[in-house]
Amino acid sequence: MNAFEDNARSIFLAALERAPDQWPAFLDEACGDNAELRARVDQLLHSHQAIGSIHAIGNIHGGGAEKQDGTRDQSMAERPGAVIGPYKLLQQIGEGGFGTVFMAEQTQPVQRKVALKVIKPGMGGRQVIARFEAERQALAMMDHVNIARVLDAGTTESGLPYFVMELVHGVPITKYCDDNQLTPRERLELFVPVCQAIQHAHQKGIIHRDIKPSNVMVTLYDGKPVPKVIDFGVAKATEQKLTERTLFTQYGTMVGTLEYMSPEQAEMSGLGADTRSDIYSLGVLLYELLTGSTPLSHKRLKEAAYAEILRMIKEEEPPKPSTRLSDSGEALASISAHRHMEPAKLTKLVKGELDWIVMKCLEKDRNRRYETANGFAADVQRYLDDEPVLACPPSAVYRLGKFVRRNRGQVIVVAVVLLCLIGGMVGTTWGLIRAINAEEQAKDDAKKAKRSDEEARAVLGFFQERVLSALRPKGLEGGLGKDATIRDALDAAEPEIEKAFAGQPLAEATIRDTLATSYWHLGENEVAIRQYERALALRRQALGPNHRDTLMSMNNLANAYGDAGRIADSLALHEQTLRERRAQLGPEDIDTLESLNNLGMFYIDAGRPAEAVPLLEESFRKAKAKLGPDHVDSLSGMGNLVRGYVEAGRPTEALPLALEVVERCTLKLGLDHPGTLIARQNLALTYRDMGRLSEALPLFEDVRNRAEAVVGGDHPGALSGMYFLGVAYQCMGRLDDAGPLLAETLKRCRAKIGSDHRKTLMVIAALAATYEEAGELGKAEPLGQELVSGTRRRLGLDHPDTNAALTQLSLILVKQHKLDDAEPLAR
Amino acid sequence: MSDCRPVDSKFMTDVTQILNAIEQGDPHGAEQLLQVVYDELRKLAAEKMAQEKPGQTLEGTALVHEAYLRLVDVKRAQHWNSRGHFFAAAAEAMRRILIESARSKAREKRGGNWQRVDFEDLNVATSVSPDQLLALDDALVRLVAVDRVAGELVKLRYFAGLALDQAAAALGVSTATAYRHWAYARAWLHSELLKET
């Protein structure tokens, strides 16, 4: 080393012994007039500080080798008295699996006390900081009274990452509640703002990932307890793959947080945490606040092996909070005492709605949890306000779940409709997507949540006793045996309705409306119409002709008319409903938008797409503005508008929308969801009508296969998939593929919806055209004849499809040189 | 880590022998040790790569690190009296492998790609680009010339993943001294890399 650099090195190291604010004076003295030396030392000190923040040359292994005994000494730099960047460590205030927390004093730019958490060796060096940096912007945007701000992060001299946070003088929420013997109500009141804090973070794009009592501190402001969520951004930054984490569990460092870990976080494949993982952890926290223990008790965690714990998190159904309480034996006395309650009273209080709320958060399938922390908080608040909660009794859901598993396929739709109902709500029928997305309905249809508690319970009770009882073995009361389908259960329940709801016309209307919707989804339009008509009559009588629910019944009935082929009835009723809804509910009301949409769709079915497009445009535009682009109503509105453009011969306008709706549906609902299938079919139709058959065909094929698997081979959705694929084959000249497929479609349509149904007629037309093109005129002719008489009878003499049918039949006859027969048709 | 193949026992014997030789004052010992460690590390990393199913490949660097962690089995290493030599060799071997990989990556990016080496498929850490790693290594070579202890310390910490106190022990200096070298080394490298950009 040359003398100059050696000198610079000595001065640099001497400066490090002093506080940064003393450096200028010290350097003035040490370097004297030697400007070059001073510049070099300044440069080194500058580098030193720059590295201290984030660009540390850390350890690229992401973890140091452990010492022989498996631990590692804390470096000399991370002890009280040490200085880390602008922070001076004062005293250690906590220690966890991941790190050590100090109270520290910040000197620059402001003087204040902060909490400084040094991450332990082995958690990764620069990766931690890189991950933190990725979130720094978002973290800086968080500003909530119940969140401790994250101020800074960096690496210490010895390469360990550290985080600086607002200092919170407090105790973990569970300890605070027990120490002060808070009642369950007081605990819930303290818990609501915790949810709101998490919601605030979620809205900024931050997921906590490590919610647990020690990260939810309660501190007193003016004598009032205020919860503060700490450690945002830390869990994500220090996150490790589970495979790596196993290394550390050997030393038991991880176990503390496993109790709060969601099933998806325990997944080796790593689905990854999202906002609903935080909801799960919040649920565990509430469980603990109510019962004094976590769903997976500490004792069991201690006894089980790591892999077994992961399995329990992923698979084991935890006991309801009330069950945990009543099973807790002698401990119940002290648990209750901490909650200022009699043991029996505590169990009774938790049983029911609080059970449901907590268990909804603990669902293994995150789609079944509350969608947002606010939704969770709102349900807790509803409980506090003595309003009915949205969460449903898990037992019914569970039983329904089992039922559905046994009756996969076509009944899935019905099952979800039933689910809405058990939540105290009634299904409506704005497009397939909406009707089967129970959670969305649960989320935003506040008006339905207002339905009276009593009514909801009556309906729920009926379903439990009359419909779900079909699960029971044959011979037992209400049991139809294990091979019963939901359809059988519905059929068996129907005659009981009148008796069961004597004197409760609104409850009867609700149940009939729901039953009808179930039948409607099954394609049983005639049964659906009967039930809807009865529901409408009941509501008209009880609520008057202009009530929102009465109008809903009209809308539902109009849909069923349309699907049963009674287009004129459907249009008339839809037009009337739209007028009334505009007048009674206003032009922006969701129900009015629904009517715009439905009327538009039946205009399309009536062969009047030009009239449909403006209605669909208005409906979609307003729904999107009101609900956002990803709401199911916006999605189905967008999809329907695509359909409108396609039918009106405007595929170029349809394409961007069609692509968008497919993308959004796939992301939101998954590939196998009927809504996504419809969206992809619409995209295929758009391509087809633009002449891009090579892009359309694989879509048609995939949709057809999936539809058959998801909804069953004779469901209208599957039939339409078959039909469109057949037509696509025909358009491409693949007549050998088109013929058998369309013939099979026709067979199923005749059996399912009848030979006179408009959709059956469309299949006949396609099959006739295929035979005609293939030169199989003998097969084409009777189909052509049937088509003409059918369209005349169904659609009238002036309908464009009737004219098309005539042209088609004439062509078939002319090709067979049957001019005498063809001539009268051409007139 | 029960599914890991134990490090070759021949390797262990070789290392023990060479370390003994070094203690006896063998001038070629360090060189031999490096060769043995380097070969074993490459072998382990290549094996690890072969086991990975396509599509779920860990990063190349992670594989090298995993191989390294297996090689530097702390429990075994503590039987050796001169662990410092072993860690120095391991750090140098790691450095060479990562640098080789970075060079071939950097070359590939420029379209060269004429000399295919075993490790060309390894991706150098996502957090450090090949160019960055190469620049760092160049600076490191210069640092060794300026302050040998500081340079070795960086190698041990950066490439062998040793904690400061472990690196101090491997170098035979006190932790306080190592800390001063470390502070200087970081500042020196940082200022050096700043110069280049």
Image (cartoon, coloured by chain):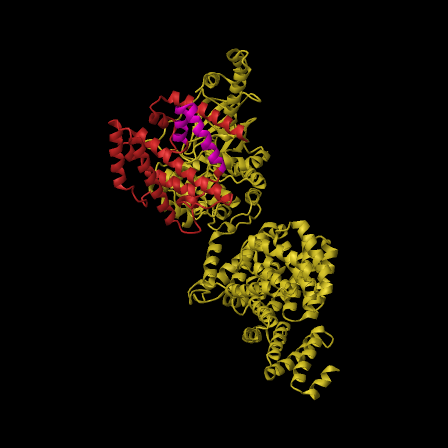
Chain colours: A yellow, B red
Q: Position of residue B180 (x, y in %)?
A: 42, 21
Q: Residue furthest bottom?
A: A820
Residue A33 visible? The answer is yes
Place residue A223 in its image quadrant.
top right
- Viewer-nearest residue: A762 or A497: A762
Q: Position of residue B94 (x, y in %)?
A: 38, 36
Majority SS type along the magenta span: helix
Q: Position of residue A24 (x, y in %)?
A: 55, 15
Residue A37 vs A306, above or below: the answer is: above
Quarter containing the C terminus of chain A: bottom right
Residue A189 vs A220, above or below: the answer is: below
Does the segment drawn in magenta span residue B139?
yes
Residue B193 vs A198, above or below: the answer is: above
Place residue B155 in its image quadrant.
top left
Q: Position of residue A582 (x, y in %)?
A: 73, 56
Give the residues drawn in magenta, as a range. B131-157
Q: Is residue A243 left or right of residue B106?
A: left
Quarter containing the N terminus of chain A: top left
Q: Is residue A800 left or right of residue A201?
A: right
- Viewer-nearest residue: A485 or A380: A485
Does the segment drawn in magenta span residue A520?
no
Q: What is the tally of numbered marks visible in this picture?
A: 0
Looking at the image, which residue is at 73% across and 77% down? A797
Looking at the image, which residue is at 67% across and 81% down? A811
Q: Is residue B108 left or right of residue A142?
A: left
Residue A469 vs A319, above or below: the answer is: below
Residue A164 visible? The answer is no
